[in-house]
Amino acid sequence: MFGKIQNYNLKENKLEITFEHNTAFIEIISASIINFFAPLKQANHSSTAIEDIKLQETKFEVKKDDFKLTICTEKLKLNVFDNFKVDIYDIDGNILCEDYRGERAPFVKRGVTPKSLELALKEGHKFNSELGEYKFNVLKKLDDNTFFYGFGEKTGHLNKKGYHYKMWNTDSAAPHVESFEMLYKSIPFFITLKDSKAFGVFLDNTFESHFDMGKENSNYYSFGAVDGNLDYYFIYGPSVKEVIKNYTYLTGRTPLPQLWTLGYQQCRWSYTPEERLMEVAKNFRERDIPCDTLYLDIDYMDGYRVFTWDRDKFNNPKNTLAQLKENGFKVVTIIDPGVKKDKGYKIYDEGIENNYFATDKDGVPYINEVWPGASLYPDFTNSKVRSWWGDNQKIIADYGVSGIWNDMNEPASFKGPLPDDVMFDNDGNKISHKEAHNVYGHYMSKATYEGLKKHTNKRPFVVTRACYAGTQKYSTVWTGDNQSLWEHLRMSLPMLMNLGLSGFAFCGTDVGGFGFDCTPELLSRWIQVGTFTPLFRNHSSIFTRDQEPWAFDKKTEDICRKYIKLRYKLIPYFYDLFWKEQSDGLPIIRPLLVHYEKDLNTYEVNDEFLCGDSILVAPIVEQGKTSRMVYLPEGNDWIDYWTKEYFSGGQFIIKKAPLDLCPVYIKAGSMLPNYPVQNYIGEKIIDELTLNIYLSKNDKSINYVHYQDDGESFDYKNGAYNLYNIEVSKAADSIKLKIDQTKNDYKNHYKGFDFNLFTDLKPSSILANSKPIKFTLSDDTISFNVKNVSEVIIK
Ligand code: MIG
């Protein structure tokens, strides 16, 4: 495709390489991030995922000999050969990523006769298509001890080696199983981990793309796309953490959410009419189950017309929402992209008048069918359409709605898929559906985010189903129509972990399962997982069993209450994680390997996850199981959250887990901030923070930074926040605690702190700023309260 290298030309960070048949570019974004680009479709190097790419000042050298070009950055060495073959080494000369030079050689698939194929297809058997032919396909050498992660929302397991995935946003109501190659989201990014060293590859191409991770043949893996430019980033670690940090440096990070979005959320298709919505709200409060958010699904609208209300079902939405607000409930409404074809309906009329809809190849507005019947698709690739759509959010926000849920934006359609030649404006640089499809949900989320920001001046809460790489800047995501199946609870763990590794720090699945009928046991176990999931939303489909915490029996309700309350205690911990994510890009849900990549036992752990760096969750994801094996990674000791039992890391243990117990372990040497349980976030004025300290037997000190702000506005961007630095250091027979407010620019402060220290030290006195204070000692816990104190000595 490229031929021999002829010469090269260096301009700032960019190397232009002239090959016999084609030109290619290598751009040094930073010492660790390299872009490989060949304008196979268009000269313009544009990106939807990456906005305002920031080149980092970095030193590098370029050399040429008869066979190759060599580029050395401070972290990497690249050899570039004829045909744009590239080998990448670390600076010590260890090979990281090597282009594959052989021919493609798929593993053999055998049939019998054409007739047997015909009959098998008739019976409904499905076979994977033949060898894919793409516009380009990059082959890399695959070694045995290689593991792959990422790809956003895919079914199957944590490790993606040996599978083939396709990026084409797809709405599928069939039960999502391992053999699915695509779902609602396209995140063409993966992480390679080998011998404790990691790098990422991001293929920035919005056409249908393919990733074969050693399925075709175990000697190579490959990525390619059906059209568009060759445009990929090599993102070095060597730690997985660094890869995530660098990837989110490129594509952006999840912005700090409003605090209430971290509470429990209850959804159903649909809570209508308003009496039903109010009844659900009342049940939460009467039954003492915390809840912040209720959702309105499509039936609140007038004939599914977006930005309208069905006045028979919601007589006075403003009043209803105000009443709910009194009780501490936020309401989130669904908004689909499909606009009903209906003269006299404002949104349709404005769209037609201004040419805001996607068109057929002749420029006539394109019509398909979704919920409202014949419908048109707003062209979100056009910035004018985005700002119009953004302004429409005001219509709904003015009723008191607190967040927007974007669905059906793959885009979905009832009358067959959108044809390839449906056209999108793309701000004057027209593109077809083939190129726009995978970014349709992205641009819709961006429009929604920017509109909500402009009209509410609060941190927008947007939930989207479809998206592309980089959408994390605008929206949280849920994983679409799962079902109330144990298999889907099991699969939600690797799916959410991989979404996290792919930049989506704020994600969740429908707790309890969307389709099919949930059972009491399944809901109990799913709520336990949801407690540690950033987006904690129970949702179920029309015509399925009720799935609210009280829908089954007292036992299930008690379990739900116990775990939802635990979630409310942990709110400040989640919020601190989101604060830290702004600078390190690390997701909330993490596979164990993120923190323990030296421990090879963690590479394939599908059924445990870390919530932040301090909590290890090992849920039960199988029916009838009341005990399980838990792997505690090596490198730390672990403390059983429920019993305070102490374990060293690097071992498998058996944990008994009756239905009301989810195995949870706290990393020894950590600190967890807690709030009191509230019915909803903001119910209580929290002027004292609880800090639970889990001392390690080995380490000498713990340091924890806690973040505090108003929980909703953008004032933190101008510095209106507080930081508390809490340090615990251990000597032979005493413990010293230092409390230091290192930033002090938000007007509310904690008046005091409640400490709970889990340790075997039995102190005789505690001095706060040199004065003795009262404390209690029970089991292994020392508890005391301090106000206006900077130093505590326990001895
Ligand atoms: O085709 O709005 O994934 O969460 O409840 C169904 C109705 C359309 C699909 C979403 C689901 C939502 C449902 N929607």
Image (spheres, rainbow, N blue to C red):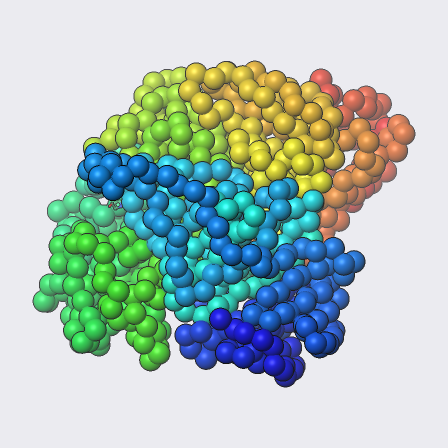
* Residue 790 spot, x, y in % from top left: 78, 44
User: Left or right: where does residue 618 sit relative to residue 545?
Assistant: right
Pick whichever, 144 or 387, lies toward us: 144
Q: Most extreme residue toward the left, as rendered?
A: 343
Q: Most extreme residue toward the right, as rendered?
A: 732
Q: In which quarter of the view is residue 421 placed? A: bottom left
User: Is residue 267 among what the camera can see?
Assistant: no
Q: In which quarter of the view is residue 253 placed? A: bottom right
Pick whichever, 571 or 657, lies toward us: 657
Residue 446, placed above or below residue 610: below
User: Left or right: where does residue 222 sit relative to residue 767?
Assistant: left
Residue at 77% over, 43% down: 727
Pick whichever, 102 or 715, lies toward us: 102
User: Is residue 311 among what the camera can see?
Assistant: yes
Indicate the quadrant of ligand 1 in the picture. top left
* Residue 651 spot, x, y in % from top left: 69, 25
* Residue 734 spot, x, y in % from top left: 86, 30
* Residue 336 spot, x, y in % from top left: 26, 55
Residue 499, placed above or below residue 776: below
Residue at 40% over, 61% down: 134
Residue 374, placed above or below residue 35: above
Residue 209, placed above or below residue 666: below
User: Left or right: where does residue 223 sit relative to residue 445?
Assistant: right
Residue at 41% over, 65% down: 135
Q: Most extreme residue toward the front, as rendered?
A: 113
Counting the numbered discs, the total is 0
